[in-house]
């Protein structure tokens, strides 16, 4: 029996007048590379060459960066001085909170700092708080951005609980726990007999001064409550000039943080002794926080932190190691790529 | 020659002088004498009617029945309780849209979870996110879905409007007897409606009368069940004759019918007219959606209207199944929930401990300040004691960490499946030219199951074969004529009928045996020639085929298209036509056959429909030479019993030999017999027939008895061999599936020999196979056969028992086994304890062939496997008898072929050809599985990384769930920053090309062994997620420790780091980069950066301008770079090692694709062509 004839008869009878070439309503899918999933494509495969190159490349990039980062960190000179424990009269160490809450006690304290290495200007003056959860949920939410920006929105204190209004209900400007807890220690530096001037201008972000804190918003009813949280504000100075507040209100990401206090535009020599006269006003004793004064120069990478350099060196080193390891492994146990004999059904299973 | 023919008849059969019965049915019914019309049910009672009549004996209880007063809608439905004929496919109205659509959408559990969390977030104590941020994503998803639904519904509204506004002539109830046009939507039950030719039928109606004097109407049911052939429907004589009085309203006609149901093949009712009761069956009703054809008009009474019509009741949506992968995914979702609860508990407990330790400091510490002094009473602010805090923190943690359960995954999965379906539908390799049908995805949620199939259960007829019967050979009086020659392609030697100046030729060409043609046309009278003529007369007359004359572009040429319900009959009539016996006209009372150029009219005096008990049919024909003959055709088993054995024994023997030869090459055989009825015989038959057909009870069995009584002592005319042509590419497809480790079981209703021969021709069975045949008819013998079979198989299996475990290893070394079992045995096995034994033996065998199985047994066999194994099953079939099996299997595929559309309606996927199974499973199934599997894992990973990063941060915020990452970013993260690439990769990525997958079917094992998604991969992915989250969190943490960095800046760094990292992770796993992939991945990162910049440009957010500040510092960029490297090194290393050393077929094939030598294949399409080659036909 001739099969080709039989099958030729099949379609022709099935499609009826199929002989007419342009079928009117054929549902045949239109051919396109897209619909047939045949778009031109690149098919990367991790060949040994690629693997080794990638590792080597990462190593080549990371090791120099790591070295550069470490060098940058090493060049940063940093003086850190914890003073909250020292600046307390020996008699009051038993009840630090009572000491700090007592306004009548003089809080002035003097510290001498030795410059370990030459420090080039600008020297950044930071205060560092430890164990202060500026990212605590109660705390971060307690602010009103509308009120800070616009004098007409002084009554917009929603979200500022529990530092929203005074007892008589008039709104506090700036409201909220963040503003209320404004840091109020002050530092004065003298080098020898000469006063080291601290420039407190431009310590905050320009974007905050220009757009977030209003020119015509003045503090109102601030720090008048039962419990004093921190600094008071000059009611005659608009908020956009209260740079300490602006800096403070950029809440820190982590419970240990630094805030910029000011900048010293003067080079310091090694072994210079700086005398710091500070007012120890801020209450960190109630929650076992620490206060530190930090003087630091800066590099292209920021402050003193070896971590990134070490991390880069580690990653780079690891990549070099892996590149070598893979090279060895590929040499010891070579495998031809795309060899059909490796397919599971071609590999002869033992037994049968 | 025609004269010769007639005289030959005349000579041989003595003309009956006064034929008492030449009941000209036409005049009879036209005159409509009460007795005659009551007596004669049209001889064409449909096959099913006889059966149904039996069923309708169960009197329709009035309570269950609908009573329709013909022509009197007011009495039928006084309370207007029945629905009008207006259809409403639209789901919603303007008012109900919002509540109903929301209700529909929230039936998804995931949305409820989403909503619950959003609601939780609205409580003031728990408000973690702003109101907008928490509700927005849910609102967005709901809105998009609602808009889509609204658009679809609007379109349905419009089509409803058109449909309802169509007009149909309706009988004026006032009794004027006039038909007036009325809109479809105003039609009511009980109204009498007229339908004209080629018009659609407006509602389900019982036929009262048609333009045909005998009450026949032809309808095309293509809209209903997709069958394009014409179906015959009948008006009862009782109503035909009384039409004028019915229309005038002078007689009360009453129809008692069953309540509306969705069975389009059944209808139970009876009709009371003038106190007479007649049964109505499915052949008396015409259904909405059908079209009236070849009938000038038909008048009917509406019984079901509007949404109660059968077509509307049948318009159900796609079946809803859940894929295997999704089931597994739910297991992992539970694991993730456990992780989520662990994280939340950890945070809340730590918070409690923290509060306890710092209990005394809370009043004064500036960042906590327990009391609110502004009110004067110094009450606590937002502090309710440690226990309550812990509880609140737990709930807040759930809100913050909610995306641990990737809600967006459900939405992306739907999108991905939609995309995959799009590509499957658009695949030109799944387009069937001959039926002009594309692939259809009816179920949208089991695409990936196609990649995990282990068992394919296939129907034979119409699935493996085309169900396009072609007459191949005949044995006439024991002489074999099988030297068929193909008709020449130009059709010059094709037999044509000349009508006036027109040539009519059969639409389908059949090869003819020249010897037989010569014999038929030879002058002079030979015994042989007479037998041959009788044989072909029998073929042309003994059927229910309706010839349709179709025009061709050439006005002089017409095609004769034979329409009928049985493809075998079609083949026989085409064959008769090819040999010169062309059936050209059929009315209810007579047929016209062009006998070798001479047109003759034969009266059809009686017809016994085929039924499955007798397995034969017969007609009683009044020939032009006034003889009355009975022609019978049927299965050999039923025919040999009723043949006259005394004279023709040699011929019967010879025929049997021929039959055996035919069936051994896979031909379907039918035996044809004839008896000349004497006048007495005929009168006797007629009286019993009339009695039976007017019987009120047991009509079906009575008619069967009449048939059996007359169908005996037949003279054998011969036998026919019809080829049930294999579909294209079936053997190759089966071979591919077998290589892919898929077991193909064939379940057929055919007899064993035919099944086995088809098994051979489609390469399912091979000569080296050992056959185990189980043919038993009692439980005991079944048990014995099974035990024997187990013994045989274990002999073979012990040699390679281990090979069974790995599907790829089996079958190569040992002798392959084939199990052949028949339906009778299965009766004793299925659902008894023997099932276990059958399972054991069947799973050992390479091939299982079940023959003579009933539809429910097919489902039983599928269940046999489904119940006992985890393996995925697929059932493929084309007919109504496959529906149960299709619904039972994990994946049901319908072949949209010849046998109607029930299988398609029940299926999850539908396609035109069996061979498409190969690209569907091996290519699309593999891709779908691999893509969805990867997408699920990736989504779990992606959200877990993010949650863990937030979790690490929470540890540094005194466990108070502050997030450094802005709430908008955390909301947009899984919706915008990283969603599109997963969807794009899920739709477009291909691990291997179509060519490779078809070249190496064994690659399909990847899905069967669940290699792309399993618990091990999940755990590995989660570990990777934790590592990456540690890297993302702690590198910036360490780098920014003891600096002035603010939360927002660090949050931005983390956001950008995690978004870029997860996208790089995805990029590393992408197999194929085309421009869309590039665009989506790099675009997503860009979008994330832009969003972060945008968010930081809002002055009212605390993070104002933070991103600009931090991006200016080198530390930021070094942190990012470090994160990418440190985050990716473990994965990259593992990937490089695994790809090189853990030999994986997919990996090897990918390398092969890229570097291997594919010279032996020149194009992408080449391997497909093996499936579209002309099939090799039968091995003779």
Image: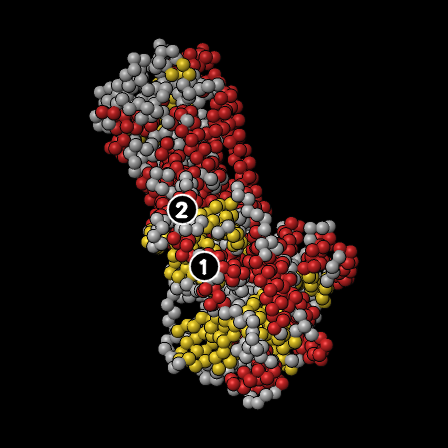
**Residue A147 picture quarter:** top left
Q: CA distance from mark 2 to mark 1?
A: 22 Å
x then y, percent, for residue B1030: 49, 39
Locate residue B95, reporting x and y percent: 34, 38
Foreground pick, A227 / B63: B63
* Residue B920 horizontal side relative to residue A61, left or right: right
Residue corresponding to mark 2: B73
Local SS, label 1: helix
B790 horizontally vs B99: left or right: right
Q: Counting other residues with Cα less than 10 Å from the Cα at mark 2, is it few (<14), some (14-19), or many (20 or more)?
A: many
- The residue lying toward the viewer, choosing from A286 and B50, is B50
**Residue B1018 visible to the viewer:** no
Q: Residue B948, position in %: x, y?
A: 49, 38
Vertical placement of residue A167 versus A13, above or below: above
Number of the front mark, 2 or 1: 1
Q: Residue at x 75, y 57 (%)?
A: B778
Can you say which quadrant of the picture contains the C terminus of chain B? bottom right
């Amino acid at each position: 029996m001739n099969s080709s004839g039989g099958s030729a008869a099949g379609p022709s009878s099935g499609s009826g007048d199929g002989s007419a070439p342009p079928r009117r309503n054929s549902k045949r899918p239109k051919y396109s590379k897209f619909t047939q999933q045949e778009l031109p494509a690149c098919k990367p495969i991790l060949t040994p060459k690629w693997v080794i190159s990638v590792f080597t490349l990462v190593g080549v990039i990371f090791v120099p960066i790591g070295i550069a980062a470490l060098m940058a960190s090493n060049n940063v000179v940093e003086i850190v001085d914890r003073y909250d424990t020292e600046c307390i009269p020996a008699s009051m160490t038993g009840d630090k909170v009572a000491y700090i809450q007592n306004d009548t006690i003089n809080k002035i304290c003097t510290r001498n700092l030795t410059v370990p290495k030459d420090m080039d200007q600008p020297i950044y003056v930071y205060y560092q708080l430890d164990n202060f959860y500026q990212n605590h949920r109660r705390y971060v939410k307690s602010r009103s951005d509308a009120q800070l920006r616009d004098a007409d929105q002084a009554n917009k204190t929603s979200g500022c609980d529990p530092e929203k209004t005074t007892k008589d209900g008039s709104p506090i400007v700036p409201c909220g726990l963040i503003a209320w807890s404004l840091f109020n220690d002050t530092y004065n530096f003298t080098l020898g007999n000469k006063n080291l001037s601290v420039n407190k201008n431009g310590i905050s972000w320009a974007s905050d001064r220009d757009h977030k804190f209003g020119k015509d918003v003045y503090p109102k009813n601030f720090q008048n409550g039962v419990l004093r949280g921190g600094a008071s504000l000059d009611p005659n100075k608009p908020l956009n000039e209260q740079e300490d507040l602006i800096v403070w209100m950029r809440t820190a990401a982590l419970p240990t943080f630094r805030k910029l206090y000011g900048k010293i535009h003067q080079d310091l020599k090694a072994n210079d002794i700086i005398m710091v006269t500070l007012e120890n006003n801020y209450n960190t004793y109630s929650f076992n926080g620490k206060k530190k004064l930090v003087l630091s120069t800066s590099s292209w990478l920021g402050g003193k932190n070896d971590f990134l350099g070490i991390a880069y060196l580690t990653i780079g080193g690891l990549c070099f190691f892996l590149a070598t390891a893979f090279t060895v492994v590929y040499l010891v146990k070579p495998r031809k790529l795309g060899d059909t004999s490796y397919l599971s059904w071609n590999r002869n299973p033992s037994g049968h | 020659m025609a004269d010769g023919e007639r005289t030959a008849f005349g000579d041989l059969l003595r003309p009956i002088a006064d034929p008492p019965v030449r009941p000209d049915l036409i005049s009879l019914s036209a005159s409509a004498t009460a007795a005659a019309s009551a007596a004669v049910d049209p001889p064409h009672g449909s096959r099913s009617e006889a059966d149904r009549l039996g069923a309708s004996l169960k009197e329709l209880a009035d309570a269950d029945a609908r009573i329709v007063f013909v022509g009197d809608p007011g009495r039928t439905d006084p309370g207007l309780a029945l629905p009008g004929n207006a259809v409403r496919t639209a789901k919603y109205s303007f008012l109900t849209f919002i509540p109903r659509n929301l209700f529909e959408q929230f039936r998804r559990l995931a949305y409820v979870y989403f909503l619950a969390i959003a609601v939780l977030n609205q409580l003031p104590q728990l408000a973690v996110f702003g109101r907008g941020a928490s509700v927005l994503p849910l609102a967005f998803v709901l809105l998009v879905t609602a808009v889509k639904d609204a658009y679809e519904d609007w379109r349905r509204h419009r089509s409803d409007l058109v449909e309802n506004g169509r007009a149909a002539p309706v009988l004026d109830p006032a009794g004027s007897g006039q038909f007036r046009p009325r809109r479809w939507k105003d039609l009511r039950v009980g109204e009498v409606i007229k339908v004209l030719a080629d018009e659609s039928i407006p509602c389900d109606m019982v036929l009262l009368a048609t333009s045909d004097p005998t009450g026949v109407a032809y309808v095309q049911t293509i809209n209903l069940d997709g069958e394009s052939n014409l179906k015959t429907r009948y008006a009862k004589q009782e109503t035909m004759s009384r039409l004028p009085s019915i229309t005038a309203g002078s007689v009360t006609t009453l129809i008692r019918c069953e309540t509306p149901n969705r069975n389009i093949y059944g209808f139970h009712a009876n009709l009371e007219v003038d106190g007479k009761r007649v049964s109505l069956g499915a052949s008396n009703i015409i259904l909405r959606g059908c079209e009236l054809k070849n009938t000038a008009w038909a008048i009917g009474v509406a019984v079901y209207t509007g949404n109660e019509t059968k077509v509307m009741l049948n318009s159900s949506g796609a079946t809803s199944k859940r894929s295997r992968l999704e089931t597994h995914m739910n297991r992992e979702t539970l694991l993730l929930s456990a992780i989520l609860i662990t994280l939340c508990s950890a945070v809340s407990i730590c918070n409690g401990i923290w509060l306890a330790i710092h209990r005394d400091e809370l009043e004064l510490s500036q960042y906590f300040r327990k009391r609110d002094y502004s009110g004067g009473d110094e009450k606590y602010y937002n502090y309710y004691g440690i226990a309550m805090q812990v509880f609140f923190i737990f709930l807040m943690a759930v809100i913050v960490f909610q995306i641990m359960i990737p809600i967006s995954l459900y939405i992306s999965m739907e999108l991905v499946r939609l995309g995959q379906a799009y590509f499957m539908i658009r695949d030109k390799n799944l387009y069937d030219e001959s039926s002009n049908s594309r692939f259809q995805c009816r179920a949208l949620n089991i695409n990936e199951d196609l990649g995990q199939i282990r068992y394919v259960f296939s129907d034979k007829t119409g699935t493996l074969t085309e169900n396009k019967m072609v007459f191949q050979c005949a044995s006439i009086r024991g002489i074999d004529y099988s030297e068929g020659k193909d008709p020449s392609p130009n059709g010059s030697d094709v037999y044509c009928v000349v009508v006036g100046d027109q040539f009519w030729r059969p639409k389908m060409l059949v090869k003819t045996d020249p010897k037989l043609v010569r014999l038929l046309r030879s002058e002079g009278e030979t015994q042989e020639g007479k037998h041959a003529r009788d044989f072909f007369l029998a073929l042309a007359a003994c059927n229910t085929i309706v010839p349709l004359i179709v025009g061709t572009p050439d006005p002089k040429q017409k095609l004769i298209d034979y329409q009928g319900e049985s493809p075998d009959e079609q083949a026989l009539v085409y064959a008769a036509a090819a040999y010169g016996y062309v059936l050209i006209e059929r009315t209810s009372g007579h047929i016209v056959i062009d006998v070798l150029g001479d047109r003759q009219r034969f009266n059809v005096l009686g017809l016994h429909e085929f039924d499955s008990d007798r397995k034969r049919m017969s007609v009683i024909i009044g020939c032009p030479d006034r003889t009355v003959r009975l022609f019978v055709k049927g299965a050999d088993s039923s025919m040999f019993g009723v043949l006259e054995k005394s004279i023709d024994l040699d011929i019967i023997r010879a025929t049997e030999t021929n039959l055996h030869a035919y069936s051994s090459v896979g031909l379907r055989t039918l035996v044809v017999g004839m008896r000349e009825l004497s006048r007495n015989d005929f009168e006797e038959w007629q009286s019993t027939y009339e009695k039976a057909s007017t019987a009120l009870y047991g009509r079906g069995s009575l008619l069967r008895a009449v048939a059996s009584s007359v169908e005996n002592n037949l003279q054998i005319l011969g036998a026919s061999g019809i080829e049930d042509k294999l579909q294209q590419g079936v053997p190759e497809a089966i071979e591919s599936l077998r290589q892919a480790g898929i077991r193909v079981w064939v379940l057929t209703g055919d007899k064993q020999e035919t099944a086995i021969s088809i098994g051979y021709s489609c390469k399912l069975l091979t000569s080296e196979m050992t056959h185990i045949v189980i043919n038993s008819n009692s439980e005991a013998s079944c048990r014995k056969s099974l035990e024997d079979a187990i013994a045989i198989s274990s002999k073979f299996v012990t040699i390679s028992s281990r090979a069974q475990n790995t599907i790829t290893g089996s079958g190569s070394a040992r002798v392959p086994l084939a199990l052949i079992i028949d339906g009778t045995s299965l009766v004793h096995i299925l659902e008894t304890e023997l099932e276990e034994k059958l399972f054991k033996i069947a799973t050992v065998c390479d091939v299982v062939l079940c023959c003579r199985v009933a539809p429910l047994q097919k489902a039983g066999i599928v269940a046999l496997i489904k119940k006992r194994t985890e393996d995925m099953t697929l059932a493929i079939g084309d007919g109504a008898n496959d529906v149960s099996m299709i619904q039972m299997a994990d994946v049901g595929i319908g072949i949209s072929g010849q046998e109607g559309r029930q299988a398609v309606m029940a299926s999850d996927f539908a396609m035109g050809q069996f061979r498409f199974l190969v690209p569907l499973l091996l290519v699309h199934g593999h891709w779908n599985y691999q893509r969805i599997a990867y997408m699920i894992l990736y989504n779990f990973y992606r959200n877990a990384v993010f949650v863990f990063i937030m979790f690490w941060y929470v540890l540094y915020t005194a466990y108070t769930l502050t997030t450094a990452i802005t709430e908008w970013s955390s909301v947009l993260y899984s919706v915008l920053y990283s969603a599109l690439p997963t969807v794009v990769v899920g739709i477009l990525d291909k691990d291997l090309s179509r060519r490779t997958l078809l070249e190496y079917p064994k690659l399909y094992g990847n899905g069967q062994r669940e290699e792309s998604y399993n618990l091990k991969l999940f755990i590995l992915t989660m570990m990777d997620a934790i590592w990456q989250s540690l890297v993302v969190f702690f590198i910036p943490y360490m780098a920014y420790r003891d600096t002035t960095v603010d939360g927002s800046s660090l949050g931005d760094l983390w956001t950008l780091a995690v978004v870029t990292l997860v996208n790089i992770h995805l990029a590393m796993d992408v197999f194929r980069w085309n421009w869309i992939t590039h665009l989506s991945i790099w675009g997503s990162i860009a979008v994330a950066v832009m969003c972060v910049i945008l968010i930081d440009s809002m002055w009212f957010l605390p993070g104002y301008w933070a991103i600009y500040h931090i991006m200016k510092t080198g530390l930021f960029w070094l942190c990012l770079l470090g994160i990418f490297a440190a985050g990716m090194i473990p994965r990259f290393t593992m990937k490089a090692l695994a790809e090189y050393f853990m030999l994986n077929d997919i990996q090897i094939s990918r390398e092969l694709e890229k570097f291997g030598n594919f010279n032996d294949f020149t194009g992408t399409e080449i391997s497909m062509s093996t499936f579209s080659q002309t099939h090799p036909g039968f091995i003779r």
